[in-house]
Image (tube, helix red, strand yellow):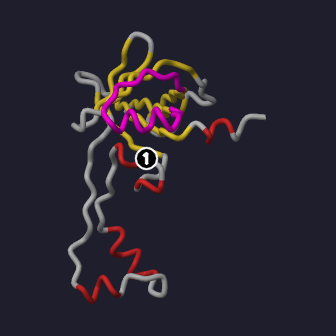
Amino acid sequence: MLSLAIHHNVWLTRDQRYALHDGIDLVVVGLYVPVWVSNQRATSEPAKELFCKYYLKNPKTDEQIQIVKDGYEITLPNRQGNLPNLTDEEWRDLNLNNPDNLKNHYSKCDKAVNSNNLLDTIDGGSKHLSFREHNKIENETINVIHFINMVEIEELTKSLI
């Protein structure tokens, strides 16, 4: 089995994060790292970091990633999270004094993965959105896995020397 794992890094300003959340399409430059994996043993590492354009969309539908002439078109995911159905007593028992119980219930939560994650923490976000998409190329035995990481641009500028 042959797989292609592509790690995408996109850095966004605050204005870009909020515009994307509001449904405004963006074109930004980002970085991707493609790694070929053969039979889960041999890889094409060390992989090269490549810059390209990212066409970002947020129509609040299912995500998809398309390869375009000069980069990638990414439609953000719109998965809504939900909390586990707990009794009042179980909710009261969720605290740091009982970490096993907290971890058990947390693992049952569906995690929200959508543009709300791009917002500032004061607005209910985390300034960060990560997700993955898995595709199989038809009539081929090739798996393509995209790992997308969108972060506030300050994470990049803080790392510059």
- Magenta run includes residue 23: yes
The residues colored magenta run: 10-30
At label 1, the amino acid type is Leu
Q: Position of residue 109 (x, y in %)?
A: 30, 65
Question: Which residue occupies the foreground of this view, 106 or 4?
Answer: 106
- On the question of residue 139 being in view, the answer is yes
Note whether residue 37 is visible: no
Q: Quadrant of the C terminus?
A: top right
Q: Which quadrant, please, contains the N terminus?
A: top left
The image quarter in which residue 55 lies = top left
Residue 86: x %, y % from top left: 23, 79
Q: Is residue 36 magenta?
A: no
Left or right: 77 in relation to 85: right
Q: Say if 59 sits above or below 103 in the image.
A: above
What residue is rendered at 32% in x and 54% in y? 112
Residue under the image location 48 percent in, 39 percent down: 149
For disc 1, the marked residue is: 119
